[in-house]
Image (cartoon, grey):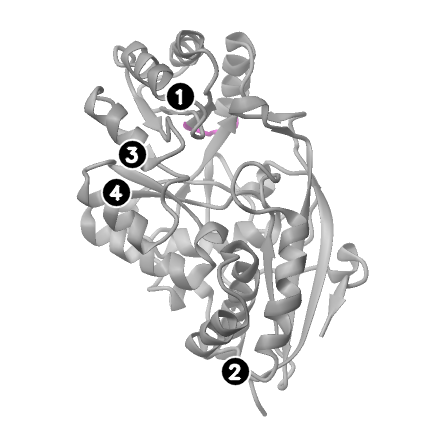
Amino acid sequence: MSAAIRNVDVFTYELTYAHGRYVMSRGRAIDRLVSTVVRIRTEDGVEGFGEVCPLGPTYLPAHSSGALAALTEFAPAVLGIDATNLAAVRTALDSALMGHEYARSALDIACWDALGRTVGLPVCELLGGRVANELPLYFAVPLGPGEIMAEYVLARRAEGVHRFQLKLGADPLEDAARTALVIEQTGDEDLVVADANGGWRLQDAVLASRALEDLPRVFLEQPCPTLEECLVVRQRTTLPMVLDESIRDVQSLMRAYGAGAMEAINLKISRVGGLTPAKLMRDLAQTLGVRLTIEDSWGGDIVTAAVAHLAASTDPEALFSVSFMNDWTVEKVAAHRPRSENGTGRAPDGPGLGIDVEVERLGRPVLAY
């Protein structure tokens, strides 16, 4: 018997946002996205699944059609490679195509799933051990009128959620007023992140940060597109800073840390290339004392399972928040597992990702090797 990869199948399916339209800065809005699922099969019959779902074509250098195009290069390259030898898989991917981390992440996750199923352990045990049993979940609040955003927060709060990421990046003073309305509806147990997704120009970001400073329990996230601009804002505010889109790899993490740019980062698994590099960056951030939000750009049950396992193996003291994307989307391909409860989540207990993917819901493969 052998763990060599015999087959790679690629599927796509649509994911619908569960709350209407998901609106961010610079007019970016989505209600439905195409997600890509990779299934590997080894010679000994073990399957592994991974998923990647870019948040539209203008959020990061990633899009659904690009994932398929890159996988036409990546998928054949891993045939015959031992799926449990993650270093060999990484080498094969590097040799096939430079970059395109988001596309390779689906294959990397699928190999972790297969590794866990082969050795009979949950992925979180292989990522360092289960140390966080209750994962503190956050919900993103789409950009809109302040009253509507406050109502959304109240609805999620009634479900047990106490961490909220407000989508901002419009007029800075109006954004501050939106945030103030939300703060009025929350309590001391709640955290509010003012997230512009890099949507403010530098001057507007400084204005917004000044206007937000008098509000309690507010964190400022990625006010501008570049690290250099965020550093200027950092010099002009006392708000604790979270960096997201600027943190792409170990090098950018170390550069930001060396510049004193943040107290926390958002670690998106697909942005960095899968669980293998995400574990490295997670461990580095923990060592440096930087807190983490563990998440991904978008996705369904498979993405959520991968996020849950990385978060469950993260020191609870270092864990700022976690997103269960399958709570944000309608379609389910693994019976809505893992599932949140009262604002918290837990990584599945079964081997690998610990979920059973209902392949019939995915239809026929769009690529098969």
Mark 4 or mark 3, which is nearer to you? 3
Q: Nearer the viewer, mark 2 or mark 4?
A: 4
Provide residue 306's location: percent of width, then percent of height: 50, 56
Lower sequence index among marks 3 and 2: 2
From the viewer's perspective, is 364 left or right of 29? right
The residue mark sitting in front, 2 or 1, is 1
Q: Is residue 305 magenta?
A: no
Q: From the image, tell me which residue sits under label 1.
A: 201
> Which of the marked residues, 4 or 3, is nearer the chain's N terminus?
3
Circle 2 residue: 82
**Could you tell me how far apart the alpha carbons at marks 3 and 2 are, in whole angstroms?**
42 Å
**Where does the magenta region start and end?**
159-163
C-alpha separation, residue under disc 1 versus residue under disc 3? 12 Å
Disc 3 versus disc 2: nearer the observer? 3
Circles 2 and 1, Cβ within 8 Å, touching? The answer is no
Quadrant of the rendered structure where residue 282 is? bottom left
Q: CA distance from mark 1 to mark 4?
A: 19 Å
Mark 2–mark 4 Cα distance, whole angstroms, equals 36 Å
**Label 2 amino acid?**
Asp
Q: Secondary structure at mark 1?
A: loop
Mark on residue 228? 3
Residue 152 at x, y = what percent? 55, 19
**Majority secondary structure in the magenta region:** loop
Front-most of residues 245 and 334: 245
Tell me whether the residue at label 2 lies in contact with that at label 4, contact meaning CB atoms closer than 8 angstroms: no
Given contact means CB atoms under 8 Å apart, are the residues at marks 1 and 3 in contact? no
For numbered disc 4, what is the local secondary structure? helix
